[in-house]
Amino acid sequence: MTAPKPPVSPLGPPIRPGGRHRRRRVRRNRFVAAAVAAFVVAGGAATAVVLTSGSPGPLSAAGGTTTGTVASTTSTTGTVATTTSATGVTTTTDPPTTTVPATSTTDAGSLPQTSAFPTSTSSEFQAEMAALWRGVVSGSPVEARPAFFPENAYLQLKTLSDPAADYTYRLLADFAADLQAAHALLGQLAGRASLIVVNVPEQYGHWIPPGVCDNSVGYYEVANSRIVYRQDGQVRSFGIASLISWRGEWYVVHLGAILRSTSQGIVDDPEIGPGSSPDSATC
């Protein structure tokens, strides 16, 4: 385990060579917030009146008429629908109810690990990667934080003497520096770049058992995922050094590199095109 170090802002994005190198196992391994959309359905108001004979009078507040013969009168509001027939029978009908699913504010990292294999097609992962991309475009680690491995999960995971310090001063500091380096890669026109897809080579996902790399809990790991984006009509990509799992979801734990010899941010293998994802046995 390396000694904790304070965050250092990158002076520029060191670029790793286009060729990949097989990474050796290292002692490496985030707060997750799920994005929730709220939908509000509002009813409008409408009145339909059909006259069969007689002279219609002015509409009343209830939607009927004060004179004339009314075959049927229907008044619809945002709360109820009232129908009055020619016989004078009034029927009140409640509108359809729109149910908004309850949301949870439980930190996934505070829950125990599971052996569920993650998938990159889950709505949770897609939300994470959208947050990660927003952070890359804006250069804001705060915006990208939902994609990072939960801190409480890391505290459960590690057998280090001070996992909280390691999480803050090494993992988060490296993540922030790498994210800002990726932002610098996009340049001054970062806002023109759009995310296409994040390709995760799940066929290379492997289980890291307890007792390996200072871990007390097992998890899945996969290296060399690719963030594929379009900028000024050109498809480009760069890598995510390592994703690890918690409770069946992938999270970024190393963005630019697992092993590093600099405190500056690193962009993992930027390429024109979608790039490739070779296997790499890391933890």
Image: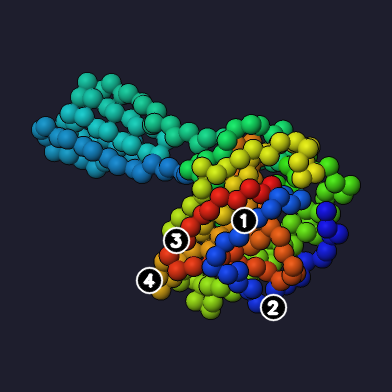
Marks 4 and 1, how far apart at CA? 32 Å
Residue under the point 45% across and 55% down:
197
Residue 268 sits in quarter:
bottom right
Q: Judge whether 38 appears above or below 239 on screen.
A: above
Residue at point 82%, 50% (across, down):
164
The local secondary structure at tag 2 comes to: loop
Residue 7 appears at what percent x and percent y?
78, 66
Amino acid type indicated by mark 1: Arg
Q: Amino acid at mark 3?
A: Pro
Nearest the eye: 202 or 85: 202
Foreground pick, 155 / 37: 155
Mark 4 vs mark 1: which is more N-terminal? 1
Q: How far, Cα to Cα, is label 1 from label 2?
A: 27 Å
What x and y, as percent, mark residue 110?
Answer: 74, 38
Residue 274: which numbered mark, if any?
3
Amino acid type of the residue that numbered disc 4 sits on in the rendered structure: Gly
Where is mark 2, residue-wise? 11
Residues at marks 2 and 3, CA–CA distance in whole angstroms: 27 Å
In front: mark 4 or mark 3? 3
Residue depth check, mark 2 versus mark 3: number of the one nearer the observer: 3
On the image, numbered disc 1 is attached to which residue?
Answer: 22
Give how far apart the Cα atoms at labels 4 and 3 are: 14 Å
Residue behind mark 4: 233
Q: Nearer the viewer, residue 109 or 45?
A: 109
